[in-house]
Amino acid sequence: MPFIHSQGLTLHVHSSGPATAPTLVLINPIGSDLRVWDAVARTLSPRFHVLQYDLRGQGLSDAPSGEYTLDDHVRDLQDLLDAHGVAHAALAGCSLGGLVAQGFALAHPARVTRLALLDTLPRIGSETSWTQRADQVRARGLPALAPDLVQRWFAPTYFQRCPTEAHGYTTLLARTPQPGYLGSCAALRDADLRGAITDLTSPTLVLCGEQDVSTPPQACQAFAEQIGAAFDVVPGAAHLPMVEQPHVVAERLGRFLQPSLEPPDDRYQRGLSVRRQVLGAAHVDRATAAASDLDRDFQTFITEYAWGGPWSRGHLDVRTRHLLTLAVLTALPREHELELHIRATRNTGVTPDDLQEVFLHVAVYAGVPVANRALQIAKRVLGEEP
């Protein structure tokens, strides 16, 4: 469902991960779109049903003229969850996205399992600062302002380390629909949750880039202490740590979110979901149906121990874990399992070019014969009808 209807608007949505897994919604800042969360989503999607969406006024979502309110954004999020049949979810929002998450958690506490707030506060900036920003956008336009505004998004080292990516995000900001940006400036101008924020009941984590000048670490830490939330600093990042340090953010989010999203005894279900995602539902269903008293405990064991263990840890995305698995199975060698996992590359995004690189690497470190045999198996399996 790439688009949903909300309050007369069309919102753009991207879904990843098993639909049966606990839902995590990732909410973007002003002047960006859902893609700023992509790297984090790739890491967390094996364990979570991840929903990313473009806030109204941004990305491929509609950008109506006029002023928006925080309540507008909160109702959009409510419609998003309703459209996907999600009764409750964890929310992670950055900057304006964090304000939306706070507003939703206050309005619908029973629907929020956990709350992760990145580089956000119950009041961001001031009425004067957002009024001035809107006036600048009207006078000069976002393309002229973007190079200066994006300097607040990232640590100085990011522009040296990733100049191409920094340019791309500058372009993303410059191409944000001006009516949408102005509408959200109005929402930020008026949004002030300071009087209500102590009513938050959801377990909460506050993260902040150590070099953020828009919502500084000291202010975020004070906010966390006020609401009794956990607090952590993301090193080497400024206002968009999920872009600058996605692996750090994904690891900390995964560690924080996991306990509430999945009960301790749910490891089997988590493993079964990932196993079906990688090997295919038909294969796993056949293996489960064929289990007898002799191997039923074994099937449960591998589902919990392997698929509910390392495969479900996050940090590495499913494709990377599959490449590692293919390399190990080639090197040992474990031909039956290798054949199974080469067939499963149709489900994980591993390409024939990826396989070629894996086998060449194994040839160097484990020997040419095993790599040659793996190539023979791959040629046969990849030639099969899907």
Image (cartoon, rainbow, N blue to C red):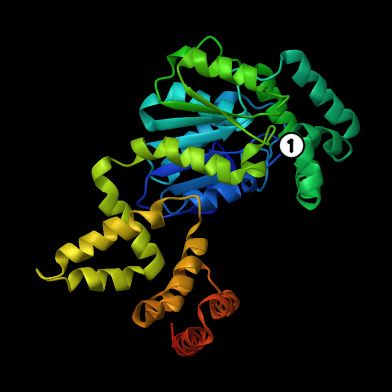
**Whether residue 382 is situated above or below residue 299 in the rendered picture:** below
**Whether residue 60 is situated above or below residue 125 in the rendered picture:** below
Residue drawn at x 47%, y 16% as measured from the top left = 227
Residue drawn at x 68%, y 41% as measured from the top left = 58
**Whether residue 371 is situated above or below residue 254 in the rendered picture:** below
Q: Is residue 92 left or right of residue 170?
A: left
Q: Toward the viewer: 156 or 198? A: 156
Where residue 214 sits, quadrant-wise, is top right
Image coords of residue 324 (percent x, y): 48, 66
Q: Residues within 10 Å of mark 1 (few under 14, many from 20)?
A: many
In this figure, what is the number of numbered marks? 1
Residue 53 seen in the figure? no
Which residue is situated farthest in the left direction here?
293
| Residue at image mark 1 | 154
The kind of residue tagged 1 is Phe
Check disc 1 and report its element: helix, strand or loop: loop
Residue drawn at x 48%, y 72% as measured from the top left = 327
Which residue is situated farthest in the top direction here?
195
Residue 199 seen in the figure? yes
Where residue 255 sits, quadrant-wise, is top left
Residue drawn at x 38%, y 31% as measured from the top left = 111
Q: Toward the viewer: 230 or 42? A: 230
Q: Toward the viewer: 292 or 17? A: 292
Locate the C terminus and report the quarter of the image it occupies.
Answer: bottom left
